[in-house]
């Protein structure tokens, strides 16, 4: 029974006019409006005291540097509303460099005298004078500002700054060295470049020429003729065939390919005694004709597309996003034009659904173009 009465009372409050008025007065927009009206009333009523307190305490302490503080506050509030506070962690060095430059500007405006309540101080207030060291006329303040400038540049890119300092220091050290301390490089007349010692060579292997038995016969017209010997017997060829045929005693390659020594002797017989043979340091170089020409390889468009796909997969395996956008097929070299992709930074966002289950989704934070140097460093692996 008590529970039923409680439900009836709540239902009565919801349906009555007084209940509706109470809900309206306790809603968020009405409460916010009441708070604004009360705040404006207090500010207008105590405006003189507020201005006096601001000038004596706040403006005297910060001076016109309070505008810099307002800029910092607006930036932080903007990051909070856009849910990008993670940028303070990712780019901490850039934000720290920004704060250092704010202090630098604050110290610079503290060199100028102020007006009104700032007449005896400076435009930067007491805090600005503290940046300069308590006064705005000595050289200590200039040195402090110079230190803030160097510190701000350092935080922008520490590695580049350290590398630049090393290069400048090395250059100064080299400039301070006297010319007499530099080692004199010996001059080699008649030859430029690195010298090499002669390589040790092995004595050339000589091949004995195999004598082929030939038989000379005398014809009626007293003209010698050559006969081929088969099984110890020869048969004379006609004169017309002997004048046109070229006698070649080198056996076929298929007959001697099982015997390397015999093959070498045959090559020597055919090319070693040629009058056109080139001789260098006692070595006779065989002609290029003894080499077999490799058949030219031609890639079709489908083959080039497959090679482009393999290049993209190889770059992807190294974590580099890229795409082949152009293929220039040539007779000996095929060029592939690669378009750099994106380096994406992501973060995991955990949320709860209506049932209270945690859902993890990946959100892209930022992306930048892949540097060409990363692709060029992998060209030997493609």
Image (tube, rainbow, N blue to C red):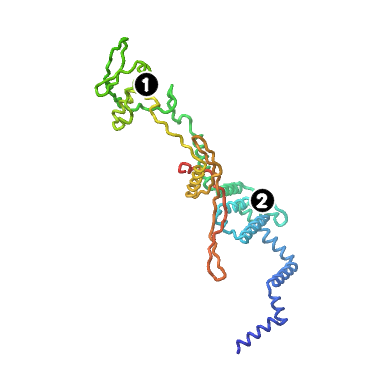
Q: Is residue 117 visible?
A: yes
Percent of width and height locating residue 174: 49, 35
**Image spot of residue 266 (x, y percent):** 31, 25
- Label number found at residue 109: 2
Q: Nearer the viewer, residue 112 or 245?
A: 245
203, above or below 359, in the image: above
Element type where label 2 sits in the image: helix
Horizontal arrangement in the rendering, residue 127 relative to residue 224 (left or right): right
Residue 374, visible in the rendered structure: no
- Tell me which residue sits at (49%, 45%) in the image: 306
- Report how far apart the C-alphas of labels 1 and 2 lie in the structure: 86 Å
Q: Which mark is residue 279?
A: 1
- Contact between labelled residues 2 and 1, with CB atoms less than 8 Å apart: no
Residue 140 or residue 225, whichever sits in front: 225
The crowd level at tag 1 (other Cα within 10 Å; few <14, some 14-19, many 20+) is few
State left or right for residue 45 relative to residue 338. Answer: right
Relative vertical location of residue 247 with respect to residue 263 in this rendering, above or below: above
Secondary structure beneath label 1: strand
Report how many numbered discs are placed on residues in the image.
2
The earlier-in-sequence mark between 1 and 2 is: 2
Of 270 and 319, nearer the camera is: 270
**Which mark is on residue 66?**
none
Q: Residue at x 36, y 19 (%)?
A: 245
Quarter residue 290 falls in: top left
Nearer to the camera, 130 or 208: 208
Left or right placement of residue 180 versus residue 46 in this view: left
Give coordinates of residue 310: x percent, y percent: 48, 46
Occupied quadrant, residue 53:
bottom right
Query: In which quadrant is the N terminus drawn?
Result: bottom right
């Amino acid at each position: 029974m008590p529970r039923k009465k409680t439900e009836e009372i709540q239902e009565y409050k919801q349906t009555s006019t007084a209940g509706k008025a109470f809900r309206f007065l306790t809603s968020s927009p009405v409460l916010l409006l009441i708070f604004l009206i009360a705040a404006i009333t207090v500010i207008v009523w105590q405006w003189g005291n507020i201005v006096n307190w601001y000038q004596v305490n706040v403006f005297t302490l910060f001076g016109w540097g309070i505008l810099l503080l307002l800029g910092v506050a607006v930036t932080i509030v903007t990051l909070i509303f856009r849910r990008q506070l993670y940028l303070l962690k990712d780019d901490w060095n850039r934000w720290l460099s920004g704060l250092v430059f704010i202090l630098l500007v604050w110290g610079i405006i503290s060199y100028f005298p102020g007006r009104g309540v700032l007449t005896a101080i400076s435009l930067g207030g007491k805090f600005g004078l503290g940046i300069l060291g308590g006064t705005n006329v000595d050289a200590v303040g200039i040195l402090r500002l110079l230190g803030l400038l160097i510190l701000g540049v350092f935080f922008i890119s520490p590695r580049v700054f350290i590398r630049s300092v090393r290069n400048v220091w090395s250059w100064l050290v080299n400039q301070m060295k006297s010319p007499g301390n530099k080692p004199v490089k010996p001059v080699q007349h008649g030859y430029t470049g690195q010298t090499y010692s002669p390589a040790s060579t092995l004595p050339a292997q000589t091949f004995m020429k195999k004598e082929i038995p030939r038989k000379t016969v005398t014809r009626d017209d007293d003209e010698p003729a050559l006969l081929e010997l088969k099984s110890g017997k020869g048969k004379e060829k006609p004169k017309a065939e002997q004048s046109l045929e070229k006698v070649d005693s080198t056996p076929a390659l298929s007959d001697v390919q099982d015997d390397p020594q015999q093959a070498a002797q045959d090559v020597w017989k055919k090319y070693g005694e040629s009058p056109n043979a080139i001789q260098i340091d006692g070595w006779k170089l065989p002609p290029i004709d003894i080499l077999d020409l490799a058949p030219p390889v031609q890639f079709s468009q489908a083959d080039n597309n497959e090679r482009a796909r393999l290049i993209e997969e190889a770059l992807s395996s190294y974590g580099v996003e890229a795409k082949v956008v152009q293929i220039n097929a040539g007779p000996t070299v095929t060029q592939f034009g690669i378009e750099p992709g994106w380096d994406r930074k992501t973060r995991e966002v955990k949320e709860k659904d209506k049932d209270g289950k945690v859902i993890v989704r990946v959100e892209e934070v930022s992306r930048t173009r892949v540097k060409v140097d990363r692709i060029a460093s992998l060209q030997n692996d493609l």
